[in-house]
Image: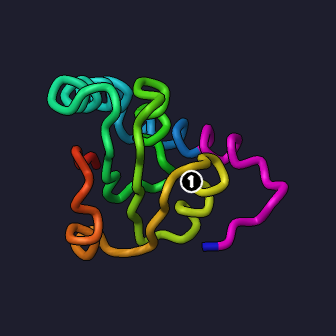
């Protein structure tokens, strides 16, 4: 995947998150509970498969909470994946259907969406 250099990806990421808050006012609470469960079940260094990852909103919270985490994001939307790829380094971003990645990511210790 190729991402445009020089774009303000952090601004795009923040804009997406603000827009999504209108649809899910309790979105941050959902992320918190999701990551509480990941931490309780997997520990402080999860390998997460982020299905329908969009711009990487779950991955952002994952890395804030678990600096040793590894994230693989999967989404069909190339524009959203471009924002994710431009915002986060050290991740794998996969432009495919979530149903096709299970066998390729068998090392994941948690799946979030």
* Residue at the spot 41% in from the left edge and 48% down from the top edge: 71
Picture quarter with the N terminus: bottom right
- Crowding at mark 1 (Cα within 10 Å: few <14, some 14-19, many 20+): many
* Residue at the spot 61% in from the left edge and 48% down from the top edge: 89
Q: Quadrant of residue 11?
A: top right
* Residue at the spot 25% in from the left edge and 27% down from the top edge: 43
On screen, residue 98 versus residue 58, left or right, reads left
Is-magenta flag for residue 9?
Answer: yes
Q: Quadrant of residue 99?
A: bottom left
Q: In this figure, what is the number of numbered marks?
A: 1
Q: How far across and how far down the image is residue 30, in percent?
A: 28, 30
* Residue at the spot 60% in from the left edge and 57% down from the top edge: 85
On screen, residue 90 versus residue 35, left or right, reads right
Q: Nearer the viewer, residue 78 or 18?
A: 78
Is-magenta flag for residue 25?
Answer: no
Say which element carries label 1. helix
On screen, residue 71 versus residue 41, left or right, reads right
* Magenta region: 2-15
Please, is residue 90 above or below residue 76 in the view?
above
Q: How far across and how far down the image is residue 102, in percent?
A: 21, 67
Please, is residue 69 above or below residue 112 in the view?
above
Snapshot colouring:
rainbow
Q: Nearer the viewer, residue 94 or 31?
A: 94
Q: How far across and how far down the image is residue 94, in percent?
A: 44, 68
Q: Which residue is mark 1?
A: 84
Q: How far across and how far down the image is residue 6, in percent?
A: 84, 55
């Amino acid at each position: 995947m190729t991402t445009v250099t020089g774009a303000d990806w952090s601004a795009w990421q923040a804009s997406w998150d603000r827009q999504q808050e209108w649809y899910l006012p309790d979105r941050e609470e959902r992320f918190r509970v999701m990551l509480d469960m990941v931490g309780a079940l997997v520990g402080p260094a999860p390998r997460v498969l982020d299905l329908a990852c969009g711009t990487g909103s779950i991955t952002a919270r994952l890395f804030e909470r678990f600096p040793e985490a590894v994230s693989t994001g999967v989404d069909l939307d190339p524009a959203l994946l471009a924002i994710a790829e431009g915002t986060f380094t050290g991740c794998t971003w996969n432009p495919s259907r979530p149903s096709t990645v299970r066998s390729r990511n068998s090392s994941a210790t948690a799946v979030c969406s």
